[in-house]
Image (tube, coloured by chain):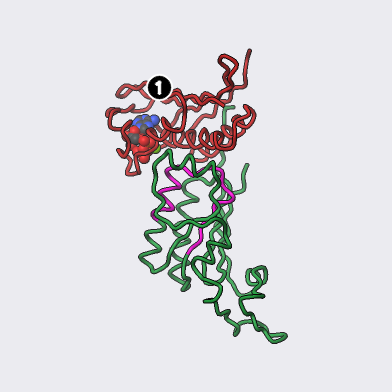
Amino acid sequence: MRHKEKRVSIKNEIDIVEAVFESKTLAETAGFSLTAQCAVSTAVSELARNIFKYAVKGVIILRIIEKDGNIGMEVVAEDNGPGIENLNLVMKGNYSTGGSLGLGISGVKRLMDEFSIDTKKRQGLRIITRKWA
Amino acid sequence: MLLHKTTMYITRECLVVPIQAELPDDALLQIQIDILEKVNASSVRGVVIDFSGVNILDSFLGRMVSDTTKMTQLLGAETVVTGLNPGIVASFIDLGVDLNARIAFNLDQGINLLTPEEDFVPDIEEEGDEEENSCDSEDYNEEESLKDDYEESTTNYEPPTTNYEL
Ligand SMILES: Nc1ncnc2c1ncn2[C@@H]1O[C@H](COP(=O)(O)OP(=O)(O)O)[C@@H](O)[C@H]1O
Ligand SMILES: [Mg+2]
């Protein structure tokens, strides 16, 4: 069964707002509770801002997924930027090279049900994360 | 697209800042500057940042609020955050960001926290007096005060042209 997919390319600051808006709409379509919609949109906001801030450009892919009769949402954040060197520190939280709080990625992991990150120095970053309704 | 517009106003010696819809980062930083300038120029008791118009509070917005709270404190005014919904609150806890602000359920309660009704003495001089203008706290009318003696400031954000690949 083919489900809806939405790609939002992140190049400008305003694209972050667009990605958040699309994620909220899709989460609503998937039948997520208001709280779960909010969790997904907050995660998308963090991931999209990271792309814009650290990798300059990239893409957020949003899709409705299904597994064993459960409906969920998958959020993929992809870029070809500098990648993350200190992944352990980033995952622990409160670590930022951008002068901000350093609570984005560790927060996304808590907001979503499944989280995987694939990154190499100078070879970009791909985060795949899912939340079930 | 969304309309990026925030209108702040002063009522009962409080600067009320309704955050509307999701705003881009530069618009949020502009609002922060506007708040500090307004607080400095007018002797308000405090600032009420109302979130009833937004869907999410991410770490960027959270930090903006936390910074604004600290800055207004240094200027002698307190900040109260109002209108957070359960979804926002649950997500915000997961992020682990500290708002550093006092919280009230809604706008009215936020204003009350900063300027308790019994404390409020309306400034009668500026009114173009019709009848006796005895505004005791009982029949204080917020509608009127918004229109009458209070300045408004508007932050207009013009979104840059964008091309999305959807
Ligand atoms: N897309 C990305 N490309 C390269 N580095 C990133 C990316 N996203 C995050 N990072 C790195 O991970 C750190 C932590 O990110 P995050 O948890 O979102 O907090 P913050 O953005 O406040 O620093 C960033 O400071 C940055 O060094
Ligand atoms: Mg971040």
Residue A118 visible somewhere in the drawing: yes
**Chain letter of the residue beneath label 1 in the structure image:** A
Depth check, front residue: A43 or B147? A43
Which region shows up in magenta? Answer: B47-67
Which residue occupies the foreground of this view, A81 or A127?
A: A127
> Residue A102: x and y, percent?
34, 39
On the image, the x and y values in percent for residue B107 come to: 57, 60
Does residue B56 show up magenta in the picture?
yes
Residue drawn at x 54%, y 76% is B118
Q: Nearer the viewer, residue A76 or A52?
A: A76
- Residue designated by label 1: A116
The residue sitting at the right extreme is B131
Estimate the x, y position of residue B35 in percent, counting from the top left: 47, 61
Quadrant assignment for the N terminus of chain A:
top right
Question: Could you tell me if residue A97 is visible in this image?
Answer: no
The percent position of residue B163, horizontal first and vertical second, equals: 57, 33
* Residue at (72, 86) in percent of width and height: B131
Secondary structure category for the residue under label 1: strand
Horizontally, residue B103 falls left or right of residue B163, namely left
The chain letter of the red chain reads A
Ligand 2 positioned in quadrant? top left
Chain B: what color?
Answer: green
| Identity, as a three-letter code, of the amino acid under mark 1 | Ser
